[in-house]
């Protein structure tokens, strides 16, 4: 906003002006008028240039990016309504006012400088640009404009500063030598112009109506995310719209938006209190009554109100420290609550991603996600700059307070306000950057998984030999996840050096050349980090190669586990797995050597002695200082070594426990009866061997905290008692109050864990069935039907996860708040209990050190509680599975005396389970030695059941089954490994050339080997992709021989 008629400073000599000053009519900066004064103001040139041009240039910079977004939009034509019509009329009014002001410069203004014409012209172009943006946004169906909001927001701030200057000059017209009529006219036109800017800012706080042509995918949603239709201000301020009619009115389950909860519902009672309080206080003053005595009633009100104040302050602190995504509304609402509760307290006292071509995914990822990443990068840059501003403001505040000559009070308020604004802006920008990067990471992960999945469906036969299932699984789980994990921290590649450089510069300003000593330490570490990073990349490549091999082998083994067990090939395959695992462990050990020991905190008792040494006459005995320092170093080293040894032992025990449980569950799954297999699905068994068993390993390193945490807390309380005396018990009372709360939360947590594991079992079972028949599913077009089933289970999971998340948040809040509240209660009681007691640095430091020691066990305890609940649920699930009915190991006898009939059944009656109907009755079979016997029958007549009965996989109700010697079983579905044809026949056994040739000839494999390109050294693709069905069966038969 310009001040075209605030032209020259009093007594300006134009001949002595520089070219820029002649362009502007005076200097752009005057430290005496702006800083060294009790009534600060900017110069006329600063008003006409920096304050007027900044919002305009911001709009010109953002417009190209926003227009490119408009062009890509699939929406079209927002209809005319009172909202966009009002914006059009007010913007047109600004264009007319700016043209009138430019004309008046030629007609009415006696002294005009070039800057006046330039500024008026810039404003005309800017408002016309804003008008065009409005029409384009309606044409392309864009409901909100970030560029317009940011322009008018900044315009309002700069205009407010100029308006104040105008009003000031109007009252001091004689001092500045302005023409009264001109200044009055300017105030009127400027006031109208500024009112239009404020009105447009208000209109840009809200989003426009839904376009006539809308995105089909979004239109098909029954409950779309409110953030899709939220205005830019709503997204920036509170992460979504303040009102959503679909979520609030047009629904069977009405609820307000988060923004409405955080603003209208939260602020209304507070503002009501602020309105009523003055009237009530005036009533108090008029009262002739005095001094209501303290009693349980008003003391309870005082304590609860104080608790509300403390909780609100802790919540505000957690927004800065613990919350990843925070919006401005969170800070505002928390601050309002603090003020409200303080007000209530005073009143009580007074009363947060070409075919056939080699290509790289990087360009595709950059063109797809690059703009979003660059926008997040820009926000992070501003945040980093603001992070450097806070220490500078603090330095100015310290200088202001410690100045020998008193400075104007407004400077103190200015520094405090600037620090608050910088902190809030930094937090808002950081939360916006983190949110964008996390969303970008999820989109990138989704895109890469989709691309890899679609590519896997189009792989040729030759490509399938190179890309195994294990490798594809790792690509879609481990590798893709790394992209998502990296995104929030990718900006640190340039942000970290920038911050280091800025910090070094500012430290140099404070310490001078001494800064280079600290810089040298960092520089020395760079070559070490470079070498470590190169080795780390090498180890990561080795590790992923080993993992691909292991997952591939495990998939093949699990796919043919029954054949493997029947042939007794466990040891052979176990050797292959362990060989790969050994290679993995070697690489992991190399990588682990980079990070070994971490140093813990010091002993508070030694620190207490050191403080006493420094602050008393003992300091004359220098050896005592050396002694305390040496003891402190030794204690710290021993503590770190012992702790690392403890964690190493616990991790080893945890891995052994996990291995043992997996082995037990695996062996149990091989012995399950037919009836038990119906109850224990594949999904449940997979979850038992992955999720449930993993919980035991995760919990074990921290299990000792069950006794260690109370011990540490008790010892800390004892030593605090030594320092503060009886005042310690007030802090202890705070901890005791939290115990019943945790008991209630734990009971609900266990319930939700049971629900969650049940839903997860159902989902994994369904996913296994879908993935097993994915080609059939794709051919029949059944994706939507199965997707609906998966999403239904997932919705149930999300409901339970939300409940669990609320419980976790409650536990974390209580246990994070407790140390702070304990310190507050203890120190407050110590001070107020006896006015003569002084909280000196020694007591405060030692007490805070013990409170910090308590913070670790108290922060781990809630996770321990949740972990114990999860392990308890997992233990119940494992016990239930282990108690399932097993196959009778004595169902098949091995009587070596009946050598004439190796296979015999007498009066056999069989069923698939004890409670299942009988399938085979009165079976009598005797198969003579050296004969070939075939079982022939119609479909469903029980041929496979008979084989299962002979193998002992059915429940024997009556009769006897006898098998002499070992059994070779060739399954109906031949099992092929991703190995050579020869290795598929040998299957881990040593090659006997004569026997091998005889078996190949007996199984009619010679002709097959002759037509294969590499003979019997031909690599067989996964699941025998390059063999016919008959060839697979002949290989399987040769293997059995």
Image (cartoon, rainbow, N blue to C red):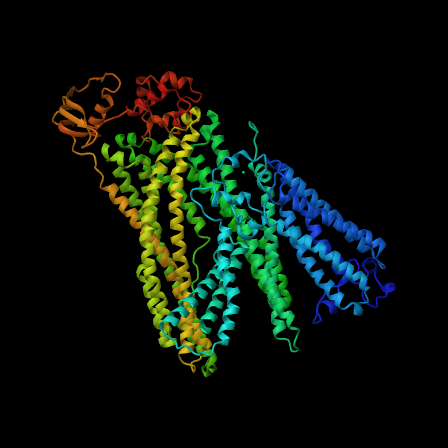
Please give the name of the residue rendered at 71% of the width and 71% of the height, measured from the top-left corner. Answer: 37
Q: Residue at x 26, y 34 (%)?
A: 677
Residue 580 % position (x, y): 39, 39
Viewer-nearest residue: 256 or 715: 256
Is 310 rendered above or below residue 499? below
Quadrant holding the N terminus: bottom right
Q: Residue at x 60, y 37 (%)?
A: 73
Figure quadrant of residue 959: top left
Q: Quadrant of the C terminus?
A: top left
Q: Is residue 897 left or right of residue 313?
A: left
Q: Does the image show residue 376? A: no
Residue 306: x %, y % from top left:
43, 68
Front position in the image: 947 or 876: 876
Please provide percent x and percent y for residue 353. 54, 38
Q: Residue 192 at what x, y percent from top left? A: 72, 55
Reply above or below: 226 against 44. Answer: above
């Amino acid at each position: 906003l310009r001040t075209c008629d605030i032209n020259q400073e009093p007594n300006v000599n134009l001949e002595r002006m520089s070219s820029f000053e002649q362009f502007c009519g005076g200097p752009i900066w005057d430290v005496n008028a702006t800083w060294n004064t009790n009534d600060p103001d900017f110069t006329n040139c600063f008003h006409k240039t920096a304050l007027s041009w900044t919002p305009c240039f911001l709009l010109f910079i953002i417009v190209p990016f926003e227009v490119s977004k408009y062009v890509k939009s699939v929406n079209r034509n927002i209809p005319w309504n009172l909202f966009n019509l009002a914006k059009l009329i007010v913007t047109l009014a600004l264009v007319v006012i700016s043209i009138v002001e430019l004309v008046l410069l030629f007609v009415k203004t006696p002294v005009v400088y070039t800057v006046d014409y330039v500024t008026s012209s810039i404003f005309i172009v800017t408002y016309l640009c804003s008008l065009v943006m409005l029409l384009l946004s309606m044409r392309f169906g864009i409901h909100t404009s970030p560029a317009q909001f940011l322009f008018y927001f900044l315009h309002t701030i700069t205009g407010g500063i100029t308006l104040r200057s105008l009003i000031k000059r109007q009252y001091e017209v004689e001092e500045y030598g302005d023409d009264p009529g001109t200044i009055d006219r300017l105030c009127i036109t400027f006031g109208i112009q500024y009112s239009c800017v404020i009105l447009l800012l208000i209109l840009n706080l809200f989003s426009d109506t839904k376009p006539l042509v809308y995105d089909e995918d979004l239109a098909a949603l029954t409950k779309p995310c409110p953030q899709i239709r939220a205005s830019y201000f709503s997204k920036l301020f509170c992460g979504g719209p303040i009102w959503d009619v679909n979520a609030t009115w047009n629904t069977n389950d009405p609820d307000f938006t988060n923004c409405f909860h955080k603003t209208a519902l939260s602020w209304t009672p507070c503002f009501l209190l602020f309105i009523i309080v003055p009237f009530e206080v005036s009533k108090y003053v008029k009262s002739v009554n005095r001094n209501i005595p303290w009693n349980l009633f008003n003391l309870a009100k005082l304590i609860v109100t104080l608790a509300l104040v403390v909780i609100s302050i802790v919540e505000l602190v957690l927004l800065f420290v613990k919350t990843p995504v925070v919006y401005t509304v969170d800070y505002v609402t928390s601050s309002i609550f603090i003020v409200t509760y303080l007000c209530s307290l005073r009143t009580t006292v007074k009363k947060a991603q070409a075919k056939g071509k080699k290509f790289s995914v990087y360009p595709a990822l950059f063109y797809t996600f690059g703009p979003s990443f660059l926008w997040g990068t820009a926000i992070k840059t501003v945040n980093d700059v603001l992070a450097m501003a806070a220490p500078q403001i603090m330095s100015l505040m310290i200088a202001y307070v410690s100045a020998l000559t008193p400075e104007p009070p407004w400077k103190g308020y200015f520094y405090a306000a600037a620090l608050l604004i910088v902190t809030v802006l930094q937090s808002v920008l950081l939360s916006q950057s983190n949110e964008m990067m996390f969303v970008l990471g999820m989109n990138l992960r989704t895109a890469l998984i989709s691309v890899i999945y679609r590519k896997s469906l189009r792989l040729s036969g030759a490509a399938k030999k190179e890309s195994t299932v294990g490798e594809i699984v790792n690509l879609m789980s481990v590798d893709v996840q790394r992209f998502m994990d990296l995104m929030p921290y990718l900006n640190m590649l340039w942000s970290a050096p920038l911050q280091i450089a800025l910090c070094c510069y500012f430290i140099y300003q404070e310490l001078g050349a001494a800064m280079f000593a600290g810089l040298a330490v960092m520089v020395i570490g760079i070559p070490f980090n470079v070498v470590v990073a190169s080795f780390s990349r090498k180890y990561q490549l080795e590790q992923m190669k080993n993992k691909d091999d292991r997952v591939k082998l495990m998939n093949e083994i699990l796919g043919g586990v029954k054949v493997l067990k029947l042939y007794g090939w466990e040891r052979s395959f176990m050797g292959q797995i362990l060989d790969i695992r050994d290679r993995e462990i070697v690489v992991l050990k190399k990588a682990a050597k980079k990070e070994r020991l971490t140093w813990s905190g010091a002993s508070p008792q030694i620190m207490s002695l050191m403080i006493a040494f420094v602050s008393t006459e003992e300091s004359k005995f220098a050896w005592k200082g050396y002694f305390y320092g040496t003891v402190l170093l030794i204690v710290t080293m021993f503590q770190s070594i012992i702790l690392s040894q403890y964690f190493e032992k616990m991790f080893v025990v945890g891995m052994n426990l996990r291995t043992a449980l997996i082995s037990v569950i695996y062996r149990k799954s091989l012995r399950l009866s037919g009836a038990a297999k119906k109850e224990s699905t594949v999904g449940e068994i997979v979850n038992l061997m992955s999720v449930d068993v993993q919980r035991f390993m995760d919990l074990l390193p921290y299990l000792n905290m069950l006794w260690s945490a109370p011990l540490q807390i008790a010892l800390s309380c004892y030593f605090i008692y030594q320092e503060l005396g009886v005042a310690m018990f007030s802090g202890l009372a705070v901890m005791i109050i939290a115990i019943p709360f945790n008991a209630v939360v734990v009971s609900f947590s266990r319930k939700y864990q049971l629900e969650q594991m049940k839903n997860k079992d159902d989902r994994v079972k369904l996913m296994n069935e879908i993935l097993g028949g994915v080609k059939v599913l794709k051919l029949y077009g059944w994706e939507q039907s199965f997707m609906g089933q998966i999403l239904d289970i997932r919705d149930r999971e999300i409901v339970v996860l939300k409940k669990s998340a609320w419980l976790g948040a409650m536990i974390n809040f209580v246990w994070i708040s407790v140390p702070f509240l304990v310190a507050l209660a203890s120190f407050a009681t110590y001070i107020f209990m006896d006015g003569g007691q002084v909280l000196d640095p020694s007591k405060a430091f030692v007490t805070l050190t013990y409170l910090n020691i308590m913070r670790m066990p108290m922060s781990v305890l809630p996770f321990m509680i949740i972990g114990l609940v999860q392990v308890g649920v997992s233990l119940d699930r494992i016990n239930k599975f282990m108690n399932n009915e097993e196959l009778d190991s004595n169902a098949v006898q091995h009587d070596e005396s009946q050598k004439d009939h190796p296979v015999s059944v007498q009066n056999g009656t069989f069923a698939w389970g004890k409670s299942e109907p009988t399938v085979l009755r009165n079976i009598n079979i005797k198969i003579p030695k050296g004969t070939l016997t075939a079982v022939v029958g119609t479909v469903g007549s029980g041929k496979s059941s008979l084989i299962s009965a002979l193998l002992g996989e059915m429940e024997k109700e009556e009769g006897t089954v006898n098998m002499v010697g070992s059994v070779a079983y060739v399954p109906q579905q031949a099992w092929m490994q991703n190995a050579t044809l020869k290795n598929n026949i040998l299957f881990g056994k040593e090659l006997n050339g004569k026997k091998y040739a005889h078996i190949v000839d007996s199984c009619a494999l010679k002709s097959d080997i002759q037509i294969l390109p590499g003979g019997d050294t031909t690599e067989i693709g996964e699941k025998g992709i390059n063999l016919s069905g008959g060839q697979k069966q002949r290989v399987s038969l040769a293997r059995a021989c």
